[in-house]
Structures are given as structure tokens and as C-alpha cells.
Amino acid sequence: MNVILHDRIPSHDYQAVFLSDVHLGTRDCRADLLADFLRGLSCRRLYLVGDIIDGWKLKRSWFWNDHHDDVLNLILRMARGGTEVFYIPGNHDEIFRRWLPHRLEVAGIRLCEQAEHVTVTGRRFLVLHGDEFDSVVRYAPFLAVLGDRAYSAALLVNRWFNTVRRRLGLPYRSLSAWLKRQVKGAVMAIDRFETAVVDEARRRGMDGVICGHIHHAVIKDVGGILYMNDGDWVESCSALVEHHDGSMQLLDMTDVRWRVAAPRHPGAVLVPADA
């Protein structure tokens, strides 16, 4: 299976859409871009793959604005309009896990610990947030909290960095994501995470896995298993979509061309339906 770069004009209508790590309730959440995406979106299934609301941050300080309201209202409108919406809690919105493993549906949104997504071509994907495969979160939660605060500091620098870029008329770029890629330990942690979730998908006989958690959007083949991380809405501002032909694609919403009538996504990663 070869992951190819492909220049296509995506439809606003998809078979399925996967979003994670929105972190509503934080200043660094790009709820404005997400709301823009959701307003023009229709899909058969919408998967909210964890950390949609940041309970960790909201416990320490309250931040919420109209864009955050817009995101929730648009998701609820989609659920009322017939879209199947699945909410898989992550570690930052783990409060919702208290209601699991009982099947629960609120306002048309189904709460579940994990999910299995079957594409129109019959490929089976395990869908999970992924924090259960993060050794720091699982075995040293106090380190996870410390890491979260260090990450918040990096995002603060990122916010000022992009303020300067915006005033210079330059597009958004994630400084914090670039810094993370330069740190050898962070790269190794990402590799270990990817290997762990792929092994779980293989153990269950799946064709691939769809997850979030590490804020690193990517589609790649790992030992014959398709690994897809839908990224986040703090740094990459990305969404994973399944087209009606069964192909899977990562979309970059930081591209301002998304917000025109006929958006283009040069270099968006596309996996064909028969890959």
C-alpha cells in the first residue's frame, strides 16, 4: 500500500469524518476554524475521537467563547439532522468515561469507549482515542499533568508567534508542532505510541486504526496495518475523512482556501479505497 500525495477538490459531503483533540475550554483551541468546517459539512457518520472538551483546563480556569458554543451547537444540529455521531472520550474529557461501559445516547450523540468503523469498501478500522497506549498517562498521571503544563507554555509561545505572522500577512504555522518534531524523545514517544495502537488493531484482526491523543496528524502503513491519526484543533487543525468511494484523506484546515466556495488542498494525504 502506497500513501500518495494528491491534489483534489474535496466535497463538503463525506461518508465519515473523524475529529479529535479539539480541547474546547482552552485559549489555544481553534474553534473558529472548526466551526467554519462544520458549517459546510454533511456526513453519514461523525466520530469525535476524544479530548473534545478539556476538563483538565476547565478545572483550573474557565475559558469559553462564542466559537466554542458554535462548535457544540453545530455538532448537535448534525446529530438532529440524521448524522450518526459517536463520542469516544479521551483523557482530558475522561469525566464522560464514568458513564461507560453502559450504552448511553444524549441528544443523538452515542457515548462509547471505542468503535469499529467499516468503510463502504468493507475495510475495518478500530477507532479509539489512544491514551490507554500512552505509558505516561497510564502509569504516571502526575507526569502527564506536568507535561500538559509544559505543553501549554509552548502553545502560549505559539500564540504570540502566530500573532506576529498574522500581522505580517503570513499564514498560520504551528511553532509548537515544529519544536515537538525536533525533540528526539518526543519523536521516539510518537513511534512507540504508533506501534502500540497498530499492534492492538492487528490483534483484533482489523485493517487499520484511527486515533488521536498525540496531536500528530498522519496516514501511513505500519507493517501492513493502516495507521491514521486525525491530528488536533490546537496545532494541526486537521480532519480525517472517508469519501464516498471509500478513500481516506487528511484535510488541513489552516489552509485559508478551505473557506472559499471551491476549496483546494494541495498535498493533502489521500489513501485510495483499494489500498
Image (cartoon, grey):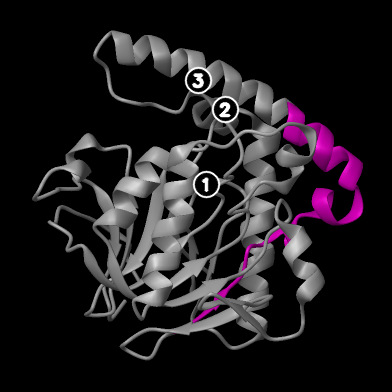
Residue pointed to by mark 2: 182
Residue at 81% from the left image edge and 42% from the top image edge = 144
Cα–Cα gap, marks 3 and 1: 18 Å
> Which amino acid lies under the numbered mark 3 shown in the image of this protein?
Arg
Q: Is residue 218 visible?
A: yes
Q: Nearer the viewer, residue 247 or 160?
A: 160
Residue at 62% from the left image edge and 69% from the top image edge = 88
How far from the left and from the top, in percent, is residue 262? 9, 50
Residue pointed to by mark 1: 216
Is 219 situated above or below 123?
above
How far from the left and from the top, in percent, is residue 179? 56, 25
Residue at 42% from the left image edge and 49% from the top image edge = 70
The disc at residue 191 is none
Whether 48 is among the magenta residues is: no
**Mark toward the viewer: 3 or 1:** 3
Tell me the magenta residue range: 124-149
Secondary structure character of the magenta stretch overall: helix
Q: Quadrant of residue 73?
A: bottom left
